[in-house]
Amino acid sequence: MTKLLQQKPLLQLRNIKKYYPIKGGILQRVQGHVKAVENVTVDVYEGETLGVVGESGCGKSTFGRTVLGLESLTEGSINFKGQEIGGLPHRKLKALKKEMQMIFQDPFASLNPKQCIGQAIEEAFIIHTNLPHNERKEIVIQLLQEVGLKPEHYDRYPHEFSGGQRQRIGIARAIALNPSLVVCDEAVSALDVSVQAQVIKLLKDIQNKHNLTYMFISHDLGVVRHISDRVLVMYLGNTVELAPVEQLFDNPLHPYTKALLSAIPRPVPGAKRERIRLQGEMPNPANPPKGCAFHTRCPIATDRCKEARPEWREVENNHFVACHEV
């Protein structure tokens, strides 16, 4: 992990913001904004897996989609391989699409039911290359075998596969053009536990083989701990903590991170962990609280937390946190 952090970052994100306008009235004027992602700053290093965790609605999926250009950037800087891509129009982003791919949460909804899977994977080569059909088909068959499927699956349709097999198809499609960065958006959350383990092993094997960099978005902390090198914790669109995975799980500093980790079942029978139960619901991102976004549910909040936004700072080696009380 230390060697990775000494390299030049593959992806540099600075003050990333994604707002959705709220329109109303007869003229449909903008009356406010849903602040889905707010001031996210992080570097992603080549060959690492950055886990992104948080409750549902914390903005982690929107963050991943914004990084890939699937959602327009409201404000901030996205630097990929030394090139500033934040705010680039769609047609200029096309050349970079080969380098940045995504594995979606729902392996069925992300596939066209009227298209055989061979065609679905081959589509990337039609858009980005000039390869003839026979060469495209040969590469697709190799990809299917790499993800644990068979050549005869080329002509089958999505409904003929199980959820785990469909996710393998999604992985094959994501790695087809030899990308550098793959965003995995809840890539195993829709799968059975036994199938999750198989897909995670496949993701790690492919990462080692192709030197891929993953941004692994998930609400399952057990999966995140198993696959990640570092973990970024988000709350209400804000980053609250970032650390190497073992450091974060062994010594969480932010009260929100502590609450998340306290909910993980203990693997040892009879072992107890003090459960931290957060009071209330996550605030509305259209009207976030002043000061620290977490102060309305934080058990150690002070008056300062209600007034001033905490600074994102490094409190230990490679361990960042945004909290006045740490």
Image (cartoon, rainbow, N blue to C red):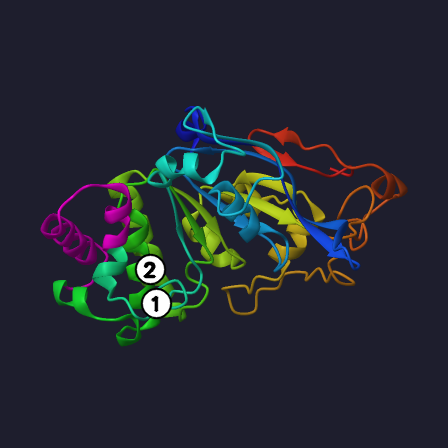
Give the side of residue 6 with respect to residue 42, left or right.
left
Query: Residue at 29% across / 60% down in the picture?
Result: 168
Q: Residue furthest bottom?
A: 160
Q: Tell me if residue 322 comes above or below residue 119 in the rendering.
A: above
Above or below 283: residue 303: above
Secondary element type, mark 2: helix
From the image, tell me which residue sits under label 1.
195
Answer whether labels 1 and 2 touch (C-beta < 8 Å): yes
From the image, tell me which residue sits under label 2. 199
Q: Amino acid at mark 1?
A: Val
Q: Which residues are magenta?
A: 122-150
Q: Can you say which quadrant of the picture contains the C terminus?
A: top right
Question: Which amino acid type is shown beneath numbered disc 2?
Answer: Val
Q: Where is residue 119, by image quadrant?
A: bottom left
Q: Residue at x 16, y 50 (%)?
A: 136
Image quarter in which the N terminus is found: top left
Would residue 28 be seen by someone viewing this image from the given angle?
yes
**Outermost residue, right side:** 303
Say which of 286 and 4 sits in front: 286
Horizontal placement of 129 versus 228: left or right?
Answer: left
Residue name at image x 18 percent, y 54 percent? 140
